[in-house]
Amino acid sequence: MADTDTAEADTVPDTPVTGTAAPGTAGAEPAEPVACTRCSTATTLLHIVGNCADCLADMGLHHPEQFVEFKAQVLAKYGSGGA
């Protein structure tokens, strides 16, 4: 068991989290909202293959045929993820 009295506190960076790119290089810009292709919500930062998280949940729960199509789009864009 670790001694919590001597553990250092987590530090929070002064800069916003921008991804894996080093500051000052391409790809280090803060995330910008992207419009969902399904519901047109323009305030979402989390999207996969053009769909916001709310639409992904709705497809998975209520529209299985659309969810199957979505999974095929993810596979086409990113591959199987296998080694």
Image: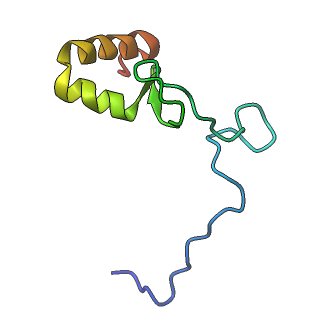
Identity of the residue drawn at 46% across and 18% down: 37
- Seen as rendered, the residue at the extreme bottom is 5
* Residue 9 figure quarter: bottom right
Q: Which residue is drawn at 18% across and 25% down?
A: 62
Q: In which quarter of the image is the C terminus?
A: top left
Q: In the picture shown, does residue 75 fall above or below 53?
A: above
Number of dots carrying numbers: 0
Residue 15 percent coordinates (x, y): 71, 56
**Residue toward you, 62 or 14:** 62
In the rendered image, residue 20, in percent from the top left (x then y), is placed at: 62, 40
In the picture, residue 24 is in which quadrant? top right
Q: Where is residue 81 in the image (x, y as percent from the top left)?
A: 38, 22
**Nearest the eye: 15 or 46:** 46
The residue sitting at 32% across, 11% down in the picture is 72
Position of residue 63 in the picture relative to residue 46 (left or right): left
Q: Which residue is drawn at 68% across and 38% down?
A: 21
* Residue 45, image x, y percentages: 53, 37
Q: Is residue 58 above or below residue 63?
A: below
| Image quarter of the N terminus | bottom left
Q: In this view, does 44 lie above or below 16?
A: above
Q: Is residue 22 left or right of residue 50?
A: right
> In the figure, is residue 75 to the left or right of 7?
left
Q: How is the image coloured?
A: rainbow
